[in-house]
Image (cartoon, rainbow, N blue to C red):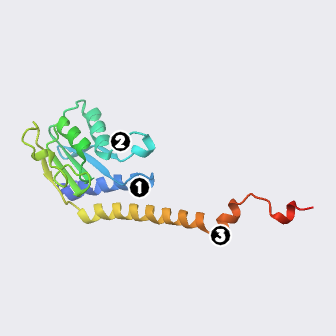
């Protein structure tokens, strides 16, 4: 990163995408997150609920936990969170409790997004913390890595189904003795 130029949302989203790629290598849904405070990256995280056997191990949660440890406080009021996929309700709740001042995400999540796609918790007036939210930063790259991951998963599942239904698989799986070998 060039220190002479101010970092932009795209710079930090690029770092979040690197975290998403790390998740994908581990077989996790490729979502990455970065926490920035005063222009400095203080923590990163990526999805790891499958490998960690932890339903709360979303990228945002990993990055928030690491940032709280790095800064010595669970409140992160001067921090910004960059994440490749719109946060879900669980993550939005943690973001609120941490008092993150700004959330920047790449891809919208029409199934679980809590920043406007399904619900908008940060616009809910009855809640006590309202981070500024910016969506669509490097959207195409963030959508692309997710599409690639799920496309590859579907292709692998198809290949497994085809392999299981092929004649070679049936022969390999058949442990019965042919009738000619059982007769006297």
Looking at this view, is 51 or 100 the one in front?
51
Mark 1 → mark 2, Cα distance in angstroms: 14 Å
Relative placement, left or right, of 51 versus 38 is right
Asked if one can make out residue 76 in the rendered structure from this viewpoint, the answer is: no
Q: To which residue does mark 3 refer?
A: 167
Residue topped by disc 2: 57
Marks 2 and 3: CB-CB under 8 Å? Answer: no
Question: Residue 117, image x and y in percent?
Answer: 19, 55
Question: What is the quadrant of the C terminus in the image?
Answer: bottom right
Q: Which image quarter: residue 53?
A: top left
Q: Is mark 3 on a helix, strand or loop?
A: helix
Residue 72 can be seen, yes or no: yes
Left or right relative to 161: residue 79:
left
Residue 33: x and y, percent?
A: 29, 49
Mark in front: 2 vs 3? 3
Q: Nearer the viewer, residue 50 or 7?
A: 50
Using the image, determine if residue 42 lies above or below residue 32: above
Residue 179, picture quadrant: bottom right
Q: How many discs appear?
A: 3
Q: Residues within 10 Å of mark 2 (few under 14, many from 20)?
A: some
- Say which residue appears at 45% left-offset and 51% top-offset: 26
Residue at the location (53% across, 66% down)? Answer: 159
Q: Is residue 40 left or right of residue 178?
A: left
Residue 85 horizontal/vertical position (percent)? 27, 54
Q: Disc 1 or 2, which lies upstream in sequence?
A: 1
CB-based contact (under 8 Å), mark 1 and mark 2 = no
Q: 90 or 164: which is nearer to us?
A: 164
Q: Name the residue under label 1.
A: 24
Q: Which of marks 1 and 3 is nearer the N terminus?
A: 1
Q: Quadrant of residue 111?
A: bottom left
Q: Is mark 2 on a helix, strand or loop?
A: loop
């Amino acid at each position: 990163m060039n220190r002479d130029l101010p970092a932009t949302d795209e710079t930090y989203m690029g770092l979040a995408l690197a975290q998403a790629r790390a998740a994908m290598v581990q077989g996790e849904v490729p979502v990455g997150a970065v926490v920035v405070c005063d222009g400095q990256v203080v923590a990163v995280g990526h999805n790891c609920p499958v490998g960690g056997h932890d339903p709360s191990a979303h990228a945002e949660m990993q990055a928030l936990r690491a940032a709280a440890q790095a800064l010595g406080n669970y409140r992160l009021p001067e921090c910004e969170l960059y994440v490749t996929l719109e946060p879900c309700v669980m993550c939005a709740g943690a973001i609120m409790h941490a008092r993150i001042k700004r959330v920047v995400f790449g891809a919208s999540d029409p199934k679980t997004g809590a920043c406007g796609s399904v619900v908008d918790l940060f616009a809910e007036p009855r809640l006590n913390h309202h981070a500024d939210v910016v969506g669509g930063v490097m959207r195409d790259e963030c959508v692309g890595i997710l599409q690639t991951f799920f496309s590859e998963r579907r292709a692998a599942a198809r290949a497994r189904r085809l392999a299981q239904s092929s004649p070679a698989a049936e022969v390999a799986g058949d442990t019965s003795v042919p009738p000619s070998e059982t007769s006297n």
